[in-house]
Image: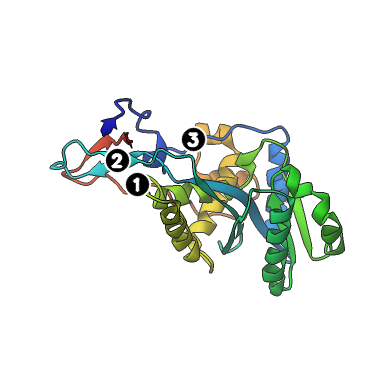
Amino acid sequence: MYGNASVCFGSWAFGCASHVPALPKQTPNGRRRIKRIHALMADEAVDLWAADEVHFQQHGSRCQMWIPPETKGPVLLHAPTRRNVGYFGVVRLRDGRSQYCRAADKFNGATFSTFVKSLRRASIRSGRRVVVITDNAKYDHARRHKQWREEHADDFALDYLPPYSPELNPIERVWKLTRRRCLHNRYFPKLDAVIAAVEAEFDQWTGRHETLRRLLLKSLCLASFPAIASRGATTSERCARDGCSVRTPLRLATELPSQRSGYGRITVTPAVFH
C-alpha cells in the first residue's frame, strides 16, 4: 500500500535546489580559528586536512527537483527503516584529495584510532607535517590513541575545533555534496545499495579533485564572513579582506544549472510502503 505525504518540504531555498547558500551561525572565536586555518594553508611545510565522520541513511533524502512536464504525480518510494552506514572521511585542502574508511562498528576510540593511523601512513608521504582539522568528539581525545599521537606529534597532529562548531569544518559541505549526488530522491531497497552508491562517488575523489578544493575554500570564506555575505559581497571580496590567498570568484559546486525551457519545478514528497 502506498501513501503520499502531502506536506511540502520548505521553500525554493530548501535542499539541493538552493541557489543562495544558508549562512552559518557564528561561533565564539570562530574568526580566530578561520585565520589559523588560513595560516596553516599558507605554510608550505604543512599539509592541512579536514576530517569528520558521517552517517548515510537507507531511507535517503528528499528535495525539490526538475521533471519533464509530461510526468504526472511522481511518487518517491521511502524505505521505512532507520538503518545507516557510517564513514570516517578526510579531505586535503590544497588539492581536494580525499580518503575514506567505512566504520565496521559504531564511532568510538577504537575505530577512530584505526582511521587516523591509516591516514598518517598515507599522508606523510608528501614529506610535509600533517595537520588534521577535527571536531571535539570524546573519542577524538581517547586515551586509547593518546600515546600514539604524542609519539608522532612531530609529523602528524590533530587540530581540534571548538565544541558545537560544524560550520568551521570545511568537510561538512563535502557530505552535503555526497548526499545531493548519491542519495537525494532515490529509493534504496537495501543498505548495500547505499554503500555502493556512496563508495562509487568516494572512489572518484581519491585523487586530486578541483571541485572539492573549490568547495572547501568556499566553505571557509562563508564561515569567515557571514555578516559580509548577507550584504551581498562576493567570495573573492571576503577573501581579500581577510588576507586569504584565494582571489578568483568561486561558486558552490552544488549549484543547480539554470532553468531549462519546458521543465517545471515541483516538490517530490516521500511515499511510505508497508
- Residue 135 vs 154, above or below: the answer is above
Residue at position x 66%, y 37% in the image: 165
C-alpha gap between disc 3 and disc 1: 27 Å
Q: Position of residue 113 (x, y in %)?
A: 73, 57
Q: Is residue 236 visible?
A: no
Of badges 3 and 2, the one in the foreground is 2
Task: Give the farthest residue toward the top.
Answer: 7
Q: Earlier in the sequence, mark 3 or mark 1?
A: 3
Side (left or right) of 141 relative to 18: right
The mark found on residue 22 in the picture is: 3
The mark found on residue 187 in the picture is: 1
Q: Earlier in the sequence, mark 1 or mark 2?
A: 2
Dot 2 crowding, Cα within 10 Å, few <14, some 14–19, many 20+: some
Q: Position of residue 74 (x, y in %)?
A: 22, 39
- Residue 249 vs 15, above or below: the answer is below
Q: Amino acid at mark 3?
A: Ala
Disc 1 is placed on an element classified as loop
Q: For this rendering, which residue is in front, 240 or 109?
A: 109
Q: For this rendering, which residue is in front, 132 or 217?
A: 132
- Residue 100 vs 137, above or below: the answer is below
Which quadrant would residue 49 be assigned to in this image? bottom right
Q: Amino acid at mark 2?
A: Leu
Dot 1 crowding, Cα within 10 Å, few <14, some 14–19, many 20+: some
Side (left or right) of 39 relative to 194: right
C-alpha gap between disc 3 and disc 2: 26 Å
Disc 2 is placed on an element classified as strand
Q: For this rendering, which residue is in front, 129 or 114?
A: 114
Q: Position of residue 43 (x, y in %)?
A: 73, 61
Quarter of the picture containing the C terminus is: top left
The answer to whether mark 1 and mark 2 are in CB contact below 8 A is yes
